[in-house]
Amino acid sequence: MFELMVLIALIFGLGLAILAAWIVLLSIYVLFRLLGFAVKASFAGIFLLPLVLLTGAIFFLNLVIIGMPLLIAFVLFRSLVGHFRRDEPDTFIVQTLPPDSS
């Protein structure tokens, strides 16, 4: 079970890393555009938008395929643990009465 959780976290983290890398690349692209460099028919201008859309699709698929079932499983697990929890405490405190002075 632990290995499966690590694999899911690795895939989800990879999607987040790809998204973060493209946010950085988009920031650099926007910075160059703001500085006045024209990107008309270059490699970046042709391929940037489809790659960003693909990365966004990968991220949202990661979120839908992995994140939502994990959230649902967590909520179900917490509710089941709360449902089957024992009512009696693990330790008992015995209260003794003071000795009768009469």
Image: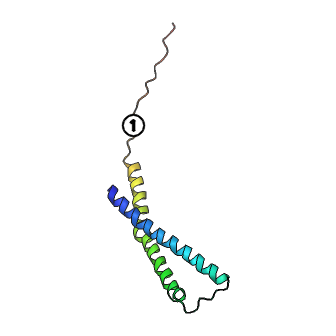
Residue at the (48%, 82%) spot, across then down:
51
The image position of residue 96, as x and y in percent, is 46, 19
Disc 1, SS? loop
Which residue is denoted by mark 1 in the rendering? 88
The front one of 56 and 97 is 56
Q: Quadrant of residue 87?
A: top left
Residue at the (44%, 65%) spot, across then down:
13
The image position of residue 10, as x and y in percent, is 40, 64
Residue at the (39%, 35%) spot, across then down:
90
Is 8 situated above or below 51? Answer: above
Is 82 situated above or below 5? Answer: above
Report the coloring of the rendering: rainbow
Among all residues in the image, which is located at the extreme top? 102
The image position of residue 75, as x and y in percent, is 43, 58
Among all residues in the image, which is located at the extreme bottom? 41
Q: Quadrant of residue 38?
A: bottom right
Residue at the (43%, 74%) spot, across then down:
61
The image position of residue 80, as x and y in percent, is 38, 53
The front one of 52 and 90 is 52
Indicate left or right for 101 with 65 as reference.
right
Is 8 situated above or below 44? Answer: above
Check disc 1 and give the amino acid type. Answer: Glu
Is 95 situated above or below 70? Answer: above
Callout 1 crowding tier (Cα within 10 Å): few <14, some 14–19, many ≥20:
few
